[in-house]
Image: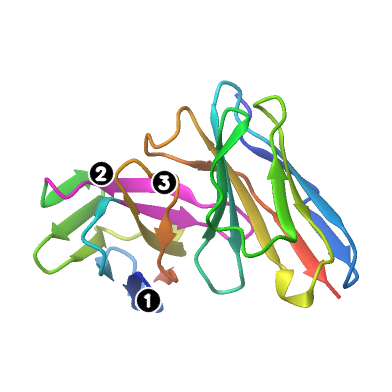
Amino acid sequence: GAGVSQTPSNKVTEKGKYVELRCDPISGHTALYWYRQSLGQGPEFLIYFQGTGAADDSGLPNDRFFAVRPEGSVSTLKIQRTERGDSAVYLCASSFRANTGELFFGEGSRLTVL
Amino acid sequence: QQQVKQSPQSLIVQKGGISIINCAYENTAFDYFPWYQQFPGKGPALLIAIRPDVSEKKEGRFTISFNKSAKQFSLHIMDSQPGDSATYFCAASMEGSQGNLIFGKGTKLSVKP
């Protein structure tokens, strides 16, 4: 079946603007994760959902970042008042159940804040 | 504080050689240690993973060696191939929190034909 799908693949925005990044997980996967990967670095955990609820949002850097998963499938990562330091690849992953090992990652959404 | 330290940053190996990447961790509460492989423009993909109750795990050409007392683990790629050229990340997570992975900074592997 299809893998994790992320849109847009590339997003260029201006400092101060609002951005939404979408993730469509693998069908049947109940857990969904957001990570951020800066150039030359490993992915950095942001938040994960089990079903509709955020089970762990300890990685969100500040209150400009917010994520939702209203129906337990598609998730949206929302970034308010973007800053140049938010430029990175935002990776989404899903797994059959939370905390069961293998995460399946999407190809990411590359965000550039000018 | 970097919780998972990975070395080397880059590695060049001849085709057929052995590639070795090392990771060290500080937090003794970590109990799950995966390795992910990432090609340019793609997301990371799980390669192999180990838990601290075993010292070694092998899957095909890929082997993880785990030293609990030293808090170190390594990835060995036997008979390295040009198609193995990618960035490799070690990671660690705590019991009950496997989705919250702490990644190393990555090793860029180039296998020369």
Q: Amino acid at mark 3?
A: Leu
- Say if labels 1 and 2 share a chain: yes
Disc 1 element: strand
Give the magenta range: B33-53
Question: Which image quadrant for residue B53?
Answer: top left
Residue at the far front in the pictured view: A63
Q: Amino acid at mark 1?
A: Leu
Percent from the top left, x then y, of residue B104? 40, 67
Which residue corresponds to mark 1? Answer: B11
Asked if the residue under mark 2 is in contact with the one under mark 3, i.e. CB atoms within 8 Å, the reply is no
- Say if labels 1 and 3 share a chain: yes
Asked if the residue under mark 3 is in contact with the one under mark 1, i.e. CB atoms within 8 Å, the reply is no
Task: Pick whichever, A79 or A107, lies toward us.
Answer: A79
Residue B46 - label: 3
The mark tally for this picture is: 3
The quadrant in which the N terminus of chain A is found is: top right
Residue B60 - label: 2
